[in-house]
Amino acid sequence: MVGEQPPYSNTGALSTFQGGLIACVDWAEWTFQKFYSVYEVFELLGMESDSFVQMEYSRNTRYNVGYYCKDADIEVYAEGKKEGMGIHIKITGSGCRDYENLELLTWLELIELILLCDGTFSRLDLAVDDIVFKGQKPYYMLSTLRKKQKAGEISSVMKLTNFQESHKIGDGSSKGKTLYLGSATSNVRIRFYEKHHERRSKGLDLVEGLEYWNRTEIQLRDENAQSAAYHIINNNGDVGTVTVGILKRYCRFCIKGSDSNKSRWKTAPFWEKFLGDVEPLYLSKAVQEMTIERRKRWVDTQTPRTMAVLFNTYGWDYIVDLIEKGSERLTDLDVEQIEKMKAKIEAEKKKEQYDKDYAYGCQQIRLHSALEHKRESIKKIIQNKLN
């Protein structure tokens, strides 16, 4: 169950999957205001610049220049039509799976780097897939959700719900159902749909024996997307827990009761089982703080090559000047973190020295005891000989 912290997994790797719940990132868009070159973005993604090709015409009308990746559905845009638009990156749903297959960075590492570089998310989609093979049962059916919608048995902070179903003209059979919570322009929108029908409609093959693939997807925009990104970091990359926590906050399928207040109606057992024991997650409450340890990890993993190039080109003067400029821009929070980290490092040094001194003291005691034992033994031998 998701409530028992399911592992994050690649939804593209179903050939070895035995069924159950899989959580994933299914769309990511963000902007860097402080990046001056697309090559900085390529490096952050862990990709070589020759993996990207400049578009003949930018696909994003807000930017003059665009690049697409040859190995994944990733687009990078620069030279905005208005000043201060920065560099924008888009990774689509299929692009997320492509990027995972390249095995460059985990989502935890990538999101952490984006936030460390002051990136701002404009969209972040999180999803939980219920993969059902022959002989297994899904957590829910879309037909059940439809009945709950029509009966008014949904409790949510969102006001709008919409249901869509497409059919074959020939025999009228269903080509897929979708239930929406929230409007298309909302900063939070939840979508439940039959992924197996969607894949078939695109001419994509399904793994043998797969009967249902129900996707529960949350589309987050702007400050809610940014907040969710921080929650993923705070949960050590556990996309499943974050996704289900948001679902628990924004949506509940109920059993109709006599009380006029839906919040006091009982939760439908299938929904309770699907969500598990994860706590509701409030998007406005993410702690948006990047620690010194995380900054150091970013410097250690992402900047050595760039720093080496700059040092060999401009020498120490450039590096020193860079540090001086950065020192002038330190915030009160930066200074507070520095002092705390210095105190922590000093405490760790003292503890390390204490442990060394303690170990040395114990060694000396053991040595002294051994010498005393030997002295006593020698005394006994001499005494015996004298007698």
Image (spheres, grey):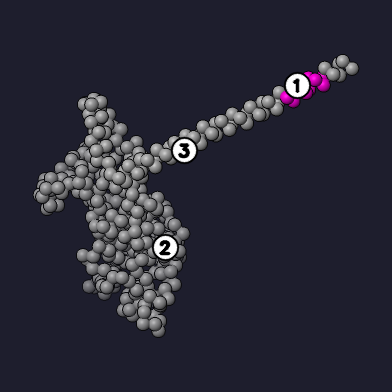
**Residue wearing tag 2:** 279
**What residue appears at the point 55 percent right and 31 percent down from the top-left corner?**
356
**Going from the N terminus, do you reach mark 1 or mark 3 first?**
3
Q: Secondary structure at mark 2?
A: loop
**What residue appears at the point 32 percent right and 46 percent down from the top-left corner?**
333
Q: Secondary structure at mark 3?
A: helix
**What residue appears at the point 34 percent right and 74 percent down from the top-left corner?**
154
**Residue wearing tag 1:** 375
Magenta span: 372-381
**Residue wearing tag 3:** 347
Instruction: State how many labels appear.
Output: 3
- Whether residues under marks 2 and 3 lie with C-beta atoms below 8 angstroms apart, the answer is no
Q: Amino acid at mark 3?
A: Ala
Q: Is residue 213 left or right of residue 384?
A: left
Task: Note whether 104 is above or below 380 in the view shown.
Answer: below
Name the front one of labels 2 and 1. Answer: 1
